[in-house]
Amino acid sequence: MDASVLRKRIYKLLIFSILMVLGILLMAFLFINHADDSLNKATYTTMDQEIDLCVQRVSSKKNTDLVLLNTFARNLNKETDLDSSLFEMKKESDFSSIQFIDMNHNVYSSKKDSKFSYNNLSDEYKDKIKNGFLGEQSTFKQKNKNYKLTYIVPVYENENQIVGVLCADSSLKPYTDLMRKSISGGNLYITDFKDFYGIQKNLESNEVLAVIKNMNLSENVNGLIGVKGQEHGIVVKKIGIQGWYLCYVNSAKSLNYSMYVMSRTTNYVLMLFVIVVILLLWIAYRMMVKNNEEMEKLAYTDQLTGAVSFARFTQLVRIYALKNNNYSLVSLNLRRFKFMNEILGRDKSDDFLCRIVTCIKPMLKKDEIICRDSADVFYMVLMDTAENKVSNRIHAIFNSIRQNTKDFCYEYEFCCGVICNGARQEKYSFEQMLTNVMFALAQSKEMASENICFFDEEVHKKKEFENFVESNMQQALDSNCFEMVLQPKVDLGSNLVVSAEALVRWKLEDGTYLPPSSFVGIFEKNRFCSKLDFYMLRKAIQQIRKWIDMGIQPVNISVNQSKIVFYHENYISELKSLLKEYDVSASYITLEVLESTVIEDFKLFNQILLEVKKLGFSVSLDDFGSGYSSLNVLSKLTIDELKIDRIFLHIDSDLENKKTKWILEGIINIAKKSNIRVVVEGVESSKDDEFIRCLGANVGQGYYYSRPLSIDAFNDLIHKK
C-alpha cells in the first residue's frame, strides 16, 4: 500500500479519535454540568424550604408575642401596683422586660430599679410610642450591646380610650433557637445589609462573612458564592421584622450529602473514564504509528540487500515522473544465478547480491534509485537518457562489481535491458517503461555474451505481433478463421487454367485479413505449421469433394507441406484417413515440398515420397533454385512437378539475364526429359510471361495471370474459361 495513503488513513483515524475524545469530553462536561445543576437546584430548593420555614417560625413567634402582649395590655389594672403587675407579666413570658408608658410619658417597668426613662429613648423608639398612642402596634429592632426586639401595643381603657402603651423587649435567643431547628447546617445571619448577626456558623464563618460583605446583597437573592474554591448556595429573604433579612449560606455537601457524594463519585469516575479512553487512544495511535513504520520498513526495504523494495521503487519513480519524465530505466540480471546458488551455497550467493547493491549505491546520482525485485533481478533509475552515457555508466558499474567480487572466484555475466525516456516526444508511462525494459532484458538474455540491450520499438512491435499470432492461432484454427484461396496456374500452351495452388489467409474478428507472409514464418518456428498444413490439406480435399458433388470436373490443387509434416511419423496414415473420409482420389492433389526438405534427409524423403505416390498424390518440388540447388536431386527423385523460384525472373543486368536464361533452359530441358512438369511462379508482367514461354516452361503462376481468388471467384473463372 502507498505510504501516503497509509498516512492519510492514520491521520483520518487520529482525527476521528480526537473527535471521539472531544465528543466524550463534551458529553462528560454536559453530564457533569447537568449533575451540578441538578445538585444546585436541589440545594436551592432545600435552602428555600428551610429559610421559608425560618421565616414562618419567626413570624409565628412574633405574632404569638404580640398576642400575648395585647393580652397583658387588656388585663393591665392601672389601679394596682403597675410595677408589680408588669413583673408578674414578665415572669409569665419570654420577654426580658416590660414597660408601661402613660400618655404623660410616665414609665412603669417590670425591672426594679430600672433606669428606663422616656427622655433617654431613641427618636425611633419615641416615634413608635407616639404611634402607639394613636392606636398602632409595632415591632422593631434595637441594638445596644446586642440585638433585641421591641414590641409596642396600645393600652385601652373602656375599650376605646387609649391611656398608654405597653412596651416589651425580647432577646433574639428564642428566635435563633427556632431558626437553628429549621435549617440543616451552614451559616445563618440576620442582617440589614450593613450589620450581620450570626445565628449559626458551621462553615468557615470569617471567610463566608467576608465574601457576603463584599457582595451587593438585596432582597430575595438566590445564587452561588465561592469560598476557598468551593461553591456555596446563598439565599436572602425578608423576615417581616422592620429592615431585617435572613441570609442563609450552605453547601450541597451539607444539605444533600448522599446526592453530593453520588454526583462527585460519578464525576470522578467519568473523568477517570475519559482519561483512560484518551490514554488508550494515544497508546493505540502510537502503536499504530510504530507498526506502520515497521511495516513500511518491511514493505519498502529489501531485507537482504538493504536496497529499496520493488513496491517502494515503483512508488518513488511514479512520484519522480510527475516532476521529470526524462530518465532511463535499467533492468539487471545475472546469467545462470541458480547455478551460483548450487555451487557457492545460499549464504555466499546472498552475500554476492549484497555486494552488487553496495557497489552500485555510491555510483548513483541524486534522485537515482536501485531496487531488488526478486532473486537476482535489479532495477535502476538513471537520470542520463543518452544511450552512450547510460552504456558507459552501466559498464562502469559492471567493472566496480567485478573488482569487489574477485574473492568469490566465480565467473559470471550480466544481462542488462535499458529503456531511455528522453528523446521521444510522447513519453512512456512508468508501466510502459517497466514492460519495455523487461522486453529489452529478455532480448539481452537471448544473446550469447554479456550485453546491454536497449529497447527497440520496431523489434518490440514485431514481438508483440508474434505474441498476438501465437496467442490466437489455435483459436483461429478451431474457429475456421484460416480461409483457403486459390491462385490459378495457367498452361502456357493452351492458356487455360489447369490447376491452382491453395494459399491461406487469416481472417481477423474485424473482417480484415492477415497475409501468409506475416505469420507463416512464426508458425514454422513454433511448429504450428504442422497443424495448419493438415488443415489446408483437409480444406483442399473438402473442395474437391464439393466440386464432385456439384458435378464439376475438379481442378488439381497444390498444397504446401512443411518438412515437419512431411517427416511426421503418422503422415501417411493421416493422408489415407483424409482420402477415405471424403472419398476423393489423390490424383486431384499435388503436395508441394520445399527443396530444403529434400536436402535435410534425402534417403528418408525418398522413402516417404514413394509411399505418397503409391497413394496417388502428385509431388512438386517447390522454390527450386532459391537455395543451393543441385541437379543431382532431380536425377534421384521421382517427382511430378518442378516449381522454379521467382528469383530467376528478377535479374537486373543483361549479363546475369543471359546466364539465368542458359541455366533455366538447362533445368527445363532436364526436367522435360525426366517427364517432370515445370511451373514458374512469380510471373508479374508480360515480359516475364514471354521470357518463360521462350524457355519452354509448361505452366505459369503469378499476378500476371491472376491474383489468389476466393472459392466463389475461382469457380466463376473456371466456368468462364
Image (cartoon, grey):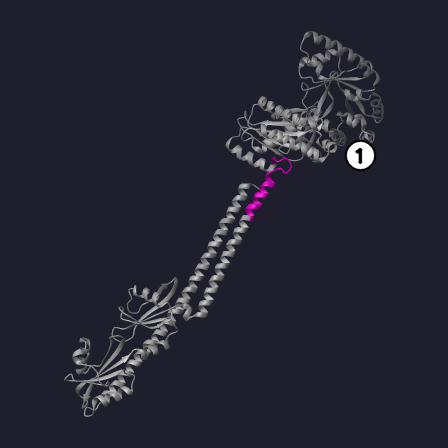
The C terminus - image quarter:
top right
Q: In the picture provided, is 219 more to the left or to the right than 380?
A: left
Whether the magenta-drawn stretch holds residue 288 is answered as yes
Question: Which residue position holds label 1?
Answer: 581
Residue 197 or 9: which is nearer the viewer?
197
Q: Give the range drawn in magenta.
A: 287-309
Does the image show residue 464?
Answer: no
Around disc 1, counting alpha carbons within 10 Å, would you say few (fewer than 14), some (14 to 19), or many (20 or more)? few
- State the image quarter where residue 581 is shown: top right
Element class at badge 1: helix
Q: In the picture provided, is 72 more to the left or to the right than 488?
A: left
Q: In the picture provided, is 503 more to the left or to the right than 389?
A: right
552 w.r.t. 671: above or below: below
How far across and down, in percent of the image, does residue 324 sit? 51, 30
Residue 716 or 404: which is nearer the viewer?
404
Main SS type for the magenta part? Answer: helix
Which residue is outermost to the bottom? 79
How far across and down, in percent of the image, does residue 667 sit? 78, 13
How far across and down, in percent of the image, does residue 261 sit? 46, 67
Query: What amino acid type is highlighted by mark number 1?
Result: Glu
Which residue is outermost to the top? 655
Which residue is outermost to the left? 104
How far across and down, in percent of the image, does residue 528 sit? 73, 30
Q: Which residue is drawn at 72% across and 31% down?
A: 340
Q: Which residue is drawn at 30% across and 77% down?
A: 172
Residue 447 or 381: which is nearer the viewer?
381
